[in-house]
Amino acid sequence: MSAAATMRAVIITESLTERTLPPGFRDLPVHRYPHDLDGQTPIEICEVTVPSARAAELALQLASSLEPRLYYAHLIDEQRMLIAFPHTVVTVARDDEAALRHACDVGALFGIPAGQMRFAEMWDTDHPDAPGAQADSE
């Protein structure tokens, strides 16, 4: 499978109501690692390589599996991001400022702090909220 035919899903284990990936993800390769949310809260990140043809379906599964407040998950490639909020998916094209603002407005409905929704930076920095993230990306 070529890189162009895949997206990378980034999911916080603690954001999932059952603390396990939805069924559609279980046959896909998963990389797990610890991360400090905002440099303070220890969490586990799951990165999953997702076939682009299944991205919308899997984003909807994530949206149905998320805790009702404070969390989102996203799937990303070079030009597109699918952001799964509880029971909602927002599609953002790279450099689409209106879609980025809309995604932040949707996230605010679920109590997600603005500092955790730095979507525009996520194409270049995996975790822009991490201390030193800007220094790491330069």
Image: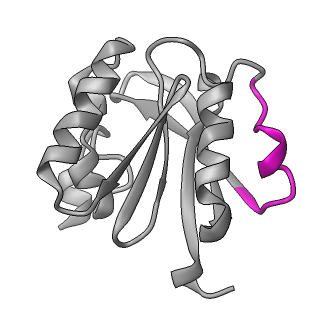
The magenta span reads: 19-30
Residue 33 visible here: no
Q: Quadrant of the N terminus?
A: bottom right
Q: Quadrant of the C terminus?
A: bottom left
Q: Position of residue 89 (x, y in %)?
A: 47, 38
Q: Residue at x 66, y 27 (%)?
A: 64
Q: Residue 37's quadrant in the figure?
A: top left
Residue in the foreground of this view, choosing between 46 and 94: 94
Q: Residue at x 57, y 53 (%)?
A: 9
Residue 24 belongs to magenta span? yes
Drawn side of residue 96 relative to residue 93, left or right? left
Drawn side of residue 62 relative to residue 86, left or right? right
Q: Residue at x 31, y 62 (%)?
A: 123
Q: Position of residue 86 (x, y in %)?
A: 53, 23
Q: Residue 52's quadrant in the figure?
A: bottom right
Question: In the image as oriented, which residue stretches furthest toward the bottom?
Answer: 2
Residue 48 visible here: yes
> Total marks drawn?
0
Q: Residue at x 55, y 24 (%)?
A: 87
Drawn side of residue 64 relative to residue 112, left or right? right
Q: Is residue 112 above or below residue 58?
A: above
Q: Position of residue 105 (x, y in %)?
A: 23, 25
